[in-house]
Image (cartoon, helix red, strand yellow):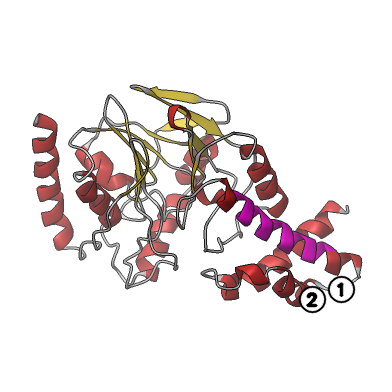
Amino acid sequence: MKYLTQLFLSLFLLGGLTASLSAAVQDQPFEKVAENIWVIHGPLEMPNVDNQGFMNNPGVVLTSEGAVIIDPGSSLQSGEMVLRMLKDVTDKPVVAVFNTHIHGDHWLGNQAIKAVWPDAPVYGHTEMLAMIKDGAGDTWVELMDKLTEGATKGTRVVGPDHALNHGDTIKVGNKTFRIHHYGQAHTRTDLMIEVVEDGVIFLGDNVTTNRIPRMVDGNFTGNINSVDRILEINAATWVPGHGKTGDVAIVKVFRGYLTAVYASAKQAFDADMDSSDVKPIALKATVAYKDWALYDEEIGPQGAQAYMEVEAAEF
C-alpha cells in the first residue's frame, strides 16, 4: 500500500507541473498480451498535434518484485500517461525500465518514470548511452516539440543509466530478460528483449505491424539478418515497436516487406537503372503493404536507400 500511496502522490505533483506546460496525453489502456504482460498499442501515425507525440507500444512485465516498463513513450506527458494506466494493472512499484533503441518516441517518457521511481535502473544499448551523451537526446526533445507544436513541452533528456549488449541477461524477481542485438538493423542501438519464462519478445522497431518504419538510421540487410536471428527463438508472443502484438506471423510478414524492397533495388541495380527507378518496381513488389501507415511517404526513399546498400555491397 505504501507504494500505491507514493505513486498517487507523485502523480498528483507531476500532474500539477505538467498542466502548466502542456495538456496530458489522452489515456490509452494496457492490453493483456500474455500472462503478466501488457502493452499499450499506440497510434500508427507520426508524432503530431492530435496524438501529442504518443505513438509507440509501451509494455509492462509484472514480476515478483514489481513492474518492468519497456519503452515508456515519447515525452514526459507520455510517460505520465503510462504511469496512470499502470495503476489498472498493478499497485506494485516500477523496478526497472528497458529502452529498445535511440529514437526518442520510445524512451523520452523515462523522465516521468524516474521522477516517481528514481531508484529504478533504466537499461539501453551501450551505443545508445554514448549517442545521448553526444547530444542525440536533445535533438529528439527538440524534434518532438516541433512535430507536436509544443505538446511535449517540459520534456528533458533522461536516458538509460545501465548499458547492455547482446547476450546480457537481467534477472528481475521471477523473470529473466535476455538481450538480443545483432548489429545495425533499424538503428545501431536496437535491443530485442526476450522475457524467457513467458516466451515473449519485445522487438522494438526491428519489426512493426501495419506501419512502415523509417529506415534512415537503419540498414535493410542488417534488419533482415536481425529478424532471421530472432526467428530462431521459438517464442509464442511477439511485440512490435508499432502496431498490434501477434504470433510469429507478424515477424515473417514484416520480413517480407524488407526483402521485397531490397530485391527491387537489386533488380534495378542489375539492370543498370538509377536509384530513382526503384520505386515503380517496389510498388509492385510490395502491393500487399500498400495500406500500411506511412507506406506512401516511405516507399520511394526506402527504395533509393536500398539501392545505395546494393551498390555499396558491390564494392
- Tell me if mark 1 has few (under 14), some (14-19) or many (20+) residues whose alpha carbon lies within 10 angstroms of its own: some
Count of numbered tags: 2
> Which residue is painted at 73% across and 74% down in the image?
284
The spot of residue 83 in percent (x, y) is 23, 47
Residue 263 painted magenta: yes
Location of residue 85 with respect to 280 vertically, above or below: above
The spot of residue 25 in percent (x, y) is 25, 62
Location of residue 54 with respect to 225 vertically, above or below: below
Residue 1 painted magenta: no
Q: Which secondary structure lies at badge 1?
A: loop
**For the residue marked with disc 2, what is the amino acid?**
Asp
**For the residue marked with disc 1, what is the amino acid?**
Met
* Most foreground residue, 244 or 268: 244
Residue 13 located left or right of residue 301: left
- Tell me if mark 2 has few (under 14), some (14-19) or many (20+) residues whose alpha carbon lies within 10 angstroms of its own: some
Q: CA distance from mark 2 to mark 1?
A: 6 Å
- Classify residue 285 by image quadrant: bottom right
* Most foreground residue, 201 or 7: 201
> Which residue is painted at 53% across and 55% down in the image?
208
The spot of residue 41 in percent (x, y) is 38, 56
Q: Which secondary structure lies at badge 2?
A: helix
* Residue contact at pointers 2 and 1, CB within 8 angstroms: yes
- Classify residue 308 by image quadrant: bottom right
Residue 91 located left or right of residue 238: left
Secondary structure that dominates the magenta span: helix
The spot of residue 77 in percent (x, y) is 26, 56
Q: Quadrant of the N terminus?
A: top left
Magenta extent: 251-266
- Classify residue 176 by image quadrant: top left
> Which residue is painted at 75% across and 77% down in the image?
280
Question: What residue did someone put label 1 on?
Answer: 273
Question: What residue did someone put label 2 on?
Answer: 277
